[in-house]
Amino acid sequence: MATFTRDTEIFRDEDMLREDYQPDSIAGREAVLDAYKTALQPVVNGAQPRNVFLYGKTGVGKTAVSRYLLDELQQDTMRYDDVDLSVFWLNCTNLSSSYQVAVNLVNTLRSVDDQISTTGYPQQRVFDLLYEELDTVGGTVLLVLDEIDHIGTDDEILYEIPRARSNGYLTDVKPGVIGISNDFGFRESLSPKVKDTLCEEEIHFSPYNAVELEEILHRRAEEALYDDATGSGVISLCAATAAQDTGSARQALDLLYKAGEIARAGDQSRIAESDVYEARNKLEQSQIEQGMRELTKHGHLALVATLQLALEEETPTRVREIFPRYRAIARHSDVDPLVRRRMHDHLADLAMLGILDRHGRNEGRSGGQYYEYQFSVDLDLVIDAVDDFENVTLPRTVARSIRARNR
Ligand code: ADP
Ligand code: MG
């Protein structure tokens, strides 16, 4: 018997459930598609493109809808000899300034053996290089800046590119910017002149409801899974679960994918509803793990202090007990401890993330109120996360538990 054999019951093509898979049809987004098409119409007419700003929470189809529609646009404009359209994508996830976006745009437009360095040029020089490249491409150029909210308030470039033509920097090209943001606050934080230029056309992507998610999942499952791979109710359960939580298609697809993996690991011939519940727990767990890893330094210190008390079986506990531990760990880790009230804010954050559970209690006769904290997640999960914290000097009890886990 071989160690590995090809899946024949659950996944027909599991790559279709992955995040980067581009569906060839869009479900449940008619109104958005209409608005988007209207915004892009000038391109088809050979006119100056409008700038478009898309926003909505993560997983609601901003990237997928843009890819789909811009592909259609490229195909359909080929019929017109006087429209020469090029579309360039830049994901701004790791870019925190207009300068970095400009450098990366230059490199996106240039060939691989002609890239510029990401540091060392004056900002205006990089903008000039960008205009040169845009003019070289010529025709109509759409620049899609996905996850643009990562540049924060350093938003100069969002003003510069759209204005470059009227300012005389560009002669042979009609540029348009499509900005995509997960964060509505980003729109509010844009400087007024950027807001006027970039947000010429705004399109809001609302969270999906259960019916829409079910439609998206059905279409995807038809090809990603074998015909009999889902027991009755599995797809609607994934859709309903994601609709109640985030309204994100990504979450719904992740649930189905994870449930499929669980079924496969259990040698089942189909996915059951119980696999979806288990998948939900697993995904929640990994979200909490990620939440713990991404805390700030003082969040990490407060977490370790509470963990120390939990390992000594002193939980539920209160800030009066946690604070001295926190302070000692901070000092051993060469960090200036916060005052008690500020550290307490970090405990409140941990409770908000679902890591700690907090209860209000009344202080006997004096009538004062205080909070009690304990972990609402499995301690092993916390120990594993703490193991990855850098530059925190761990108390002996915590270090010992980590060693025991790793043995
Ligand atoms: P966003 O960019 O808003 O974070 P994505 O476009 O990446 O979200 O969508 C997340 C996942 O859901 C992707 O796999 C995408 O293909 C799928 N998806 C989202 N909306 C739709 C839709 N309307 N029809 C089909 N698939 C969709
Ligand atoms: Mg996206």
Image (cartoon, rainbow, N blue to C red):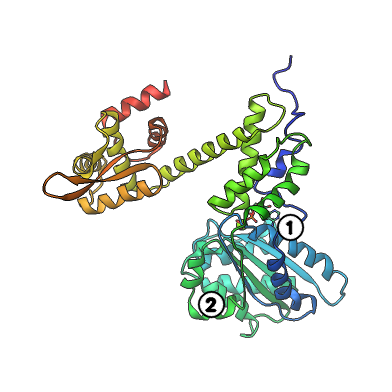
Badge 1, how many Cα within 10 Å: few under 14, some, many 20+?
Answer: some
Q: Is residue 11 left or right of residue 149?
A: right
Can you identify the residue that label 1 sits on? 26
What residue lies at 68% left-to-right and 75% top-to-bottom?
175
Q: Nearer the viewer, residue 301 or 7?
A: 7
The numbered dot on residue 194 is 2
Q: Find ligand 2 in the image and state its quadrant.
A: bottom right
Q: Position of residue 263 (x, y in %)?
A: 65, 30
Q: Is residue 206 left or right of residue 225?
A: left
Residue 177 falls in image quadrant: bottom right
What residue lies at 72% left-to-right and 65% top-to-bottom?
30
Residue 260 falls in image quadrant: top right
Q: Is residue 139 left or right of residue 147?
A: right
Nearer the observer: mark 2 or 1; the answer is 1
Q: Nearer the viewer, residue 230 or 43?
A: 230
Q: Position of residue 114 (x, y in %)?
A: 67, 60
Q: Is disc 1's CB within 8 Å of ligand 1? A: yes
The numbered dot on residue 275 is none
Please state which amino acid type lies under the numbered disc 1: Ile
Q: Say above or below: 66 vs 210.
A: below
Q: Position of residue 124 (x, y in %)?
A: 54, 74
Confirm whether residue 110 shows in the render.
no
Badge 2, how many Cα within 10 Å: few under 14, some, many 20+?
Answer: some
Q: Is disc 2's CB within 8 Å of ligand 2? A: no
Q: Earlier in the sequence, mark 2 or mark 1?
A: 1
What residue lies at 72% left-to-right and 32% top-to-bottom?
10
Residue 43 falls in image quadrant: bottom right
